[in-house]
Every structure is written in structure tokens, then in C-alpha cells.
Image (cartoon, rainbow, N blue to C red):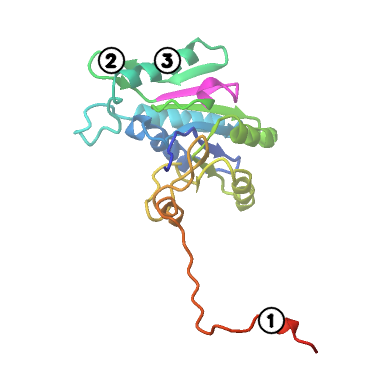
Amino acid sequence: MVGETGGKDFIFVHPSAEIPPLISAMVRGAFEYQGQKCAAASRAYVPRSLWPQVKEMLLAKTAEIKVGDPSDFTNLMAAVIDRSAFDSIKSYIDYARESDEAEVLTGHYDDSKGYFVYPTIIETTNPRFKTMREEIFGPVLTIYVYEDDELDSAVRHCKEDTIYALTGSIFAQSREAIVALESEFNYTAGNIYINDKPTGSTVGLQPFGGSMMSGTNDKTGTKMNLYRWISARTIKENFVPTDDVNYISMQER
């Protein structure tokens, strides 16, 4: 059995990150397919020094998203799959609205005609806030803004605060930072992306897997997966058999 059991996929932003590509990755990663992807971006860690510009651009781009009939290809988003999903996603948004530790910067829902959850962005002051830890499976992105001089603490929260380890992305222009963060996040995701959204893996090129409560880390697109479907066997054939019991090493010198 190969298990695929969920994700809480992250975008970790270093102070050296380039902002416009980051905004694109956040919007696409979090809101495509209504966030109903196990690899959808669901939490982000943004340094205080970049947050004012990131916030302004992110809200502006999110406001441009068209939501409606999926047969109209100008719509980026449509309704979520059913009433159960709508109610579950709605409960997380309501929880954030009622909390002193979070602010819903944008987003709402409407089930008057279809189960529509609009792109939602939450800012929290608590890196262990509920919407930073639990899988929502909807168009909800929660952002924790960390102090630039507390980067190590933010990395630790990213690594330790959720039970999932499916996908994640690093945004940085500093090569030194990319190498260091990639190493730090060894066990946080089966797929790590650098300066790209944490979703959209290509079968056959990127083995799609994760660890911890995200699954068995041997999904399609990798030779590792084949070992789940076989019983390994080795065969030895001797073309020069010997009739001697003793080994060469046993001969007297």
C-alpha cells in the first residue's frame, strides 16, 4: 500500500527574496483549484522587512482573481466540491475572525448559489495558530510575519509545528540562504521548490512524496515506487564451480 494522507504546505520567505515572483507563487499556489490540492500552499513565513510590500501586492493581486463557472477559462477559481467541504473551510475562516491572534485580511464565502469560498488570506501573530497547523483543503493562506533577526526561530516553527511533510518552497536570492534553508528543511517535505510555488510536480520528473503524516514518500514518478509492487529476488550462477573444500587462504606458506 502506498499512502497519501495530507499536507500543510509552506512558503518560506528569506529577507533576500524577490517579491513579484513570490506574489505569483502565493496566489497560484494557494488558490488554484480552490486550494483543493494536497500540495496547495497553505502557510507562509514572511520577514517583517518585506511584509508591507508583500501585503500590498498580495492583496492587490488577490483582488483581481475571478471566481465563477469553471467553463469560463477567465475564472481562476470555482466552487469547492460539496457542502461538507464548504462547511469545513468556513469554520476555519470563522475561527480566525473570532480570534485575537489573527486577522482575515481578505476573503469570504457564499453558498446561496453553489459552494463558493473566495480567496482568503489570514495574518496571524501566532506561528502555531490553528490555520498554520491543520490541513484545510481550501483557498485559505495563513501568513506569519517573523522578525528578520528571528529567522532561526521561524525556520524551527516551519519544521516542527505541523504533523505533515509533503511540499514546501523557499524564496531567496541569496545562494547561501537557499543552501542553508534547503538543508534545514530536509525532513519537512518530499518535494522542495526554490523560488516557485510548492505545487505542480511533474510525474516522471519529480517523485511526489512526503513523510511524517503526509505518506510513505514513494509516490508515482520514482523507482522507489516500484519496490512496493514486487518481491525482490537475487540469482547467483557459478560458471567456474570448485570441488575443493579448502580456500586459498588456508594453504600453507
Tell me if residue 121 is in the magenta stretch.
Answer: yes
On the rendered image, what quadrant is the C terminus found in? bottom right
Give the label, 3 or 1, closer to the camera. Answer: 1
Residue 143 % position (x, y): 52, 28
Residue 145 % position (x, y): 59, 28
Depth check, front residue: 213 or 88: 213
User: Which residues make up the magenta segment?
Assistant: 120-132
Depth check, front residue: 116 or 235: 235
- Residue at 45% from the left image edge and 31% from the top image edge: 58
Q: Is 159 placed left or right of 202 in the picture?
A: right
First reached walking from the N terminus: tag 3 or tag 1: 3
Residue 111: mark in rendering: 2
Q: Which residue is mark 1?
A: 247
User: In the structure shown, which secondary structural element does the residue marked by tag 1 occupy?
Assistant: loop
Give the label, 1 or 2, closer to the camera. Answer: 1
User: In the structure shown, which secondary structural element does the residue marked by tag 2 occupy?
Assistant: loop
First reached walking from the N terminus: tag 2 or tag 3: 3
